[in-house]
Image (cartoon, rainbow, N blue to C red):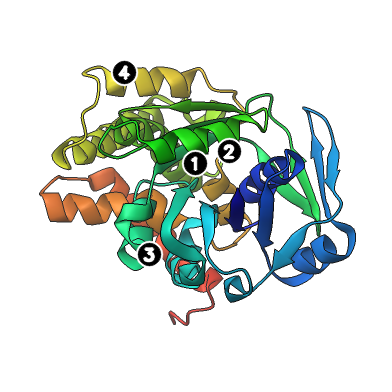
Amino acid sequence: MKIAIMGTGGVGGYYGGLLAHSGEDVTFIARGPHLRAIREKGLQVKSVHGDFLVSVARATDDPREVGPVEFVLFTTKTYQTDDAAQAIKPLIGSKTVILPLQNGVDAADRIGTVAGKEHLLGGITWLSAAIEAPGIIGQYSPFRRIILGEFDGNTTPRLQEILRVLKRTGATVEVADNISEILWTKFIFISSISAMGALTRVMIGEYRSVQETHAMLADAVGEVVAVARAKGVTLPSDIVTRTLSSIDGSPPNLKPSLQRDVEAERICELESMVGIIVQLGVELGVSTPVMKVAYAILKPGQLKARGINIG
């Protein structure tokens, strides 16, 4: 299968590397030193499941050099989504399938607005991976799981074909007929701990043990759930309790990527993790006071990280 990896970071580099290693025709979309290293030395993957090298790796920073492909794995950071969606237009043919594996819940809408919603599948992944150095991807978690599905719940030939190709990599890959529910279930967890972690700037085990902070965390979870339900997403009746139980049972040293980026004064996924809940709350008439406070406190730092003069 002819495949393009749009965003060769930890997620795209790892799954793209697996796809190339399993014999698929893969082109990596990358840039800067990472691109040069892949072109010169191939893509090296260091993984808990076994290291490997894609010794002859096609890579470019210009999708126009690639032309239409059968499958686009879309794995950029969420703040790059709109520009990347424009960039993949040359990759899109009449039957191209696009699978976003990003944080957040709005990727398919944003990409589909530009590239055509008919090309989109819903997808979500559980993976710990990062660029360790130019041309080198580190993968650290025993889990490497993808769930994908059609947004209307149907099992289509294209869905079965993408499932077949991804399963050949050795990753755990499943199809779901309720992909929106699964996307939001993960998002409720990650959105709330991203907001609270970035506000408190301590590890999850430290802030969840403080009664007042835990109560605020529970309110944040409830706000995200209320927005999801107002948007028409079907969720279990005990989703708030279930999410809080997952948070309370998480490793005490957990820090989500948004929190790490905020602490390092880097650009982060604030808009897609927190801002989207504030925006949807306004649109849907749902009160989101905790997420509004989190967004208001964190936004100035993000504007500064982006080099926007706010003084």
Q: Can you tell which of label 3 and label 2 is closer to the viewer?
A: 3
Q: CA distance from mark 3 to mark 2?
A: 34 Å
In which quadrant of the rendered view does residue 223 lie? top left
Q: CA distance from mark 3 to mark 4?
A: 38 Å
Label 1 neighbourhood size at 10 Å, few (<14), some (14-19), many (20+)? many
Where residue 5 sits: x, y (%)? 61, 55
Residues at marks 2 and 1 touching, judged by CB atoms closer than 8 Å: yes
Residue at point 60% right, 29% down? 167
Q: Can you tell which of label 3 and label 4 is closer to the viewer?
A: 3
Q: CA distance from mark 2 to mark 4?
A: 21 Å
Residue at point 87% right, 52% down? 55
Please state which amino acid type lies under the numbered disc 3.
Ala
Disc 1 designates what residue?
197
Disc 3 designates what residue?
115
Label 1's element? helix
Residue 97: give its label: none
125 displayed left or right of 51: left
Q: CA distance from mark 4 to mark 1?
A: 19 Å
Q: Earlier in the sequence, mark 2 or mark 4?
A: 4
Q: CA distance from mark 3 to mark 1?
A: 34 Å
Residue at point 76% right, 41% down? 21
Label 4's element? helix
Disc 2 designates what residue?
255
Disc 4 designates what residue?
241
| Camera-nearest residue between 78 and 306 | 78
Q: Is residue 109 visible?
A: no
